[in-house]
Image (tube, helix red, strand yellow):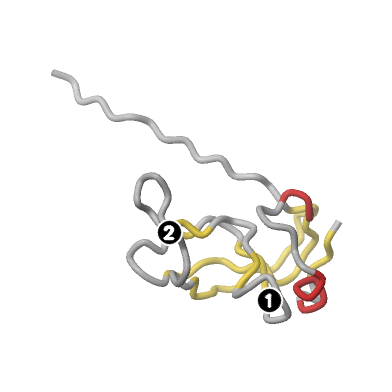
Amino acid sequence: MPYVKPVETAERINFLASSKFQNFTYQVSDEGVQPDERGRKIVKAGTILPANDSTAEGILFTDVDVTEGPQPGALLVEGYVLEERLPVAPTADAKAALTKITFR
C-alpha cells in the first residue's frame, strides 16, 4: 500500500517594493500568538514587531513558527515596502518609528 500524504502549500504575499533591503536576526516572541487550525502558532510575514506602535523596530520578513517558544526570524529594518500588502496596516506611530523603511 503506497504512503499518501496531503500536500500543504504556502501562500506568501510579496510586500517588497524593491530588491534592496536590509534584514537582521530578531527573536520573535510567542506571547499573545493564537494557534491556527492545526494548533501551530505562526507569526506572519509582514507583521510589525515588537508591536504596531512607537516601539516598532522592523517588519518580519518571513513566517516564523513559535509553537515551541520564541524563535529567531529575519526582521526587515531598511527598504521599500508596499503598505497595502502587509497583513495589518502600520499605524502612524509605527511609521514614524521605522525611519529607514519607506512605505509606498
64 to the left or right of 103: left
Q: Quadrant of residue 35?
A: bottom left
Q: Residue at x 36, y 46 (%)?
A: 38
Amino acid identity at mark 2: Asp
Of all residues, the one furthest to the bottom in this rendering is 55
In the rendered structure, which disc, 1 or 2, sits on the residue that comes first in sequence? 1
Could you say where residue 98 lies in the image, as x and y percent from the top left?
76, 74
The foreground one among 80 and 67 is: 67
Q: For mark 2, does the 10 Å Cα neighbourhood hold few (<14), some (14 to 19), or many (20 or more) residues?
A: many
Could you say where residue 82 lies in the image, as x and y percent from the top left?
79, 53
Number of numbered discs overlaid on the protein picture? 2
Q: For mark 1, does the 10 Å Cα neighbourhood hold few (<14), some (14 to 19), or many (20 or more) residues?
A: many
Q: What residue is shown with label 1?
A: 56
Looking at the rendered structure, which numbered label has been put on residue 68? none
Q: Residue at x 28, y 29 (%)?
A: 5
74 to the left or right of 36: right
Please, what secondary structure does the residue beneath circle 2 have?
A: strand
- State the quadrant of the C terminus: bottom right
Please, what secondary structure does the residue beneath circle 1 have?
A: loop
Of all residues, the one furthest to the top in this rendering is 1
Could you say where residue 1 lies in the image, as x and y percent from the top left?
13, 18
CB within 8 Å, label 1 to label 2:
no
Amino acid identity at mark 1: Ala
Could you say where residue 95 lies in the image, as x and y percent from the top left?
80, 71
Q: Quadrant of residue 47?
A: bottom right
Q: CA distance from mark 1 to mark 2?
A: 20 Å
Q: Residue at x 60, y 63 (%)?
A: 60
Q: What residue is shown with label 2?
A: 65
